[in-house]
């Protein structure tokens, strides 16, 4: 695959080609995913749950993220690498710059932070420091204790209007990408249409510019009841794990995933 850059993602949005993203935590999976055409690999702090066995992402440290980012970078064949900033690693712009620099040195091309308009100064400083930022909005798992559980966000006109305004604010501040998790399909479609930057969704319907899933979910490795938006591609593949990655890319690009039943109203 020709190396994927932020410019590639912008071009894909402009011509309406869907962007595929999967979470990835090690070199072997990075090699297989990027070889199958997955354009963006996310070292998600979901690793706290799926690799480390915690019940939330809160215990994950910047050292954990740097270690897995370096592993992914060694196996990658041209995908854009996005690394999550873990809980409390960006509570001030100075912490954000220092910790994002650690992830970029480990091999990331972009960092992801959870929040909204309160991140604007941080996003601008990261951009001036040469670090593109993806802002994760909607259900932000690091705030699970504030939400009181993993719940759909942005329901109702007021909450939806607020999320759209915050998405426009982070774009104006210099965000490179917005990621929407568990928001109503209609709201995700409004935000995607309003923003010039790519919008990646998970549980946010088919109208986003791209889709992301957690690796273990898309391989059908659930320890509990899977979320509504999860589809297992391994069970549908005739060619094992590599085939599952190809099937996922094809389904995203052809608009077959997510289907209406994977979304929220
Ligand atoms: O950490 C993660 O895996 C994520 C995805 C759910 C988007 O942030």
Image: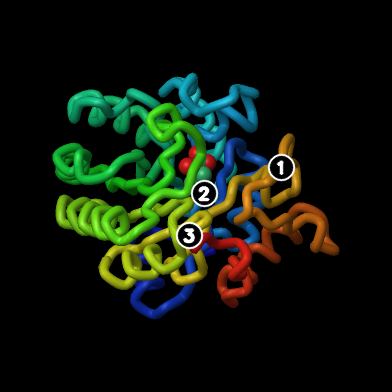
Q: Is mark 1 within 8 Å of ligand 1?
A: no
Total tally of numbered discs in the picture: 3
Residue carrying label 1: 225
Check disc 3 and report its element: helix, strand or loop: loop
Give percent across and percent down for residue 32.
Answer: 67, 51
Position of 97 compared to 41: left or right?
left
Distance from Cα at disc 1 to Cα at disc 3 = 19 Å
Of the numbered discs 2 and 1, the one sitting upstream in the chain is 2
Check disc 1 and report its element: helix, strand or loop: loop
Residue carrying label 2: 41
The image shows residue 71, relative to residue 1, as above or below, that is above
Tell me the quarter of the picture where residue 96 sits.
Answer: top left
Of the numbered discs 1 and 3, the one sitting upstream in the chain is 3
Check disc 2 and report its element: helix, strand or loop: strand
Quarter of the rendering occupied by the N terminus = bottom right
Which residue is found at the position 25% from the left and 52% from the top?
175
Position of 238 compared to 206: left or right?
right
The image shows residue 95, relative to residue 112, as above or below, that is above
Around disc 3, counting alpha carbons within 10 Å, would you say few (fewer than 14), some (14 to 19), or many (20 or more)?
Answer: many
Residue carrying label 3: 204
Around disc 2, counting alpha carbons within 10 Å, would you say few (fewer than 14), some (14 to 19), or many (20 or more)?
Answer: many
Distance from Cα at disc 3 to Cα at disc 2 = 19 Å
Around disc 1, counting alpha carbons within 10 Å, would you say few (fewer than 14), some (14 to 19), or many (20 or more)?
Answer: few
Give percent across and percent down for residue 103.
Answer: 38, 32
Of all residues shown, which one is farthest toward the bottom? 15
Can you tell which of label 2 and label 1 is closer to the viewer?
1
Q: Is residue 43 visible?
A: no
Of the numbered discs 3 and 2, the one sitting upstream in the chain is 2
Give percent across and percent down for residue 253.
Answer: 56, 73
């Amino acid at each position: 695959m020709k190396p994927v850059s932020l410019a590639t993602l912008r071009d894909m949005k402009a011509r309406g080609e869907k962007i595929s993203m999967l979470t990835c935590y090690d070199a072997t999976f990075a090699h297989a995913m990027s070889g199958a055409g997955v354009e963006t690999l996310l070292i998600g702090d979901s690793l706290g749950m799926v690799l480390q066995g915690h019940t939330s992402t809160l215990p994950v440290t910047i050292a954990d993220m740097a270690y897995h980012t370096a592993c992914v970078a060694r196996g990658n064949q041209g995908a854009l690498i996005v690394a999550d900033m873990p809980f409390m690693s960006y509570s001030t712009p100075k912490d954000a710059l220092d910790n994002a620099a650690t992830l970029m040195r480990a091999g990331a091309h972009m960092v992801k932070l959870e929040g909204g308009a309160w991140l604007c100064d941080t996003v601008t400083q990261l951009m001036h420091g040469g670090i593109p930022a993806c802002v994760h909005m909607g259900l932000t798992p690091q705030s699970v204790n504030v939400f009181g559980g993993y719940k759909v966000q942005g329901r109702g006109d007021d909450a939806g209007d607020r999320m759209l305004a915050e998405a426009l604010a982070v774009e104006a501040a210099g965000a490179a990408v917005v990621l929407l998790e568990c928001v109503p399909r209609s709201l995700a479609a409004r935000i995607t249409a309003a923003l010039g930057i790519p919008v990646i969704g998970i549980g946010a319907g088919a109208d986003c510019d791209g889709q992301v899933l957690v690796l273990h979910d898309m391989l059908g490795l659930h320890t509990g009841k899977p979320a509504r938006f999860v589809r297992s591609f391994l069970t549908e593949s005739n060619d094992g794990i590599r085939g599952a990655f190809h099937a996922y890319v094809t389904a995203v690009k052809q608009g077959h995933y997510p289907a209406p039943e994977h979304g929220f109203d």
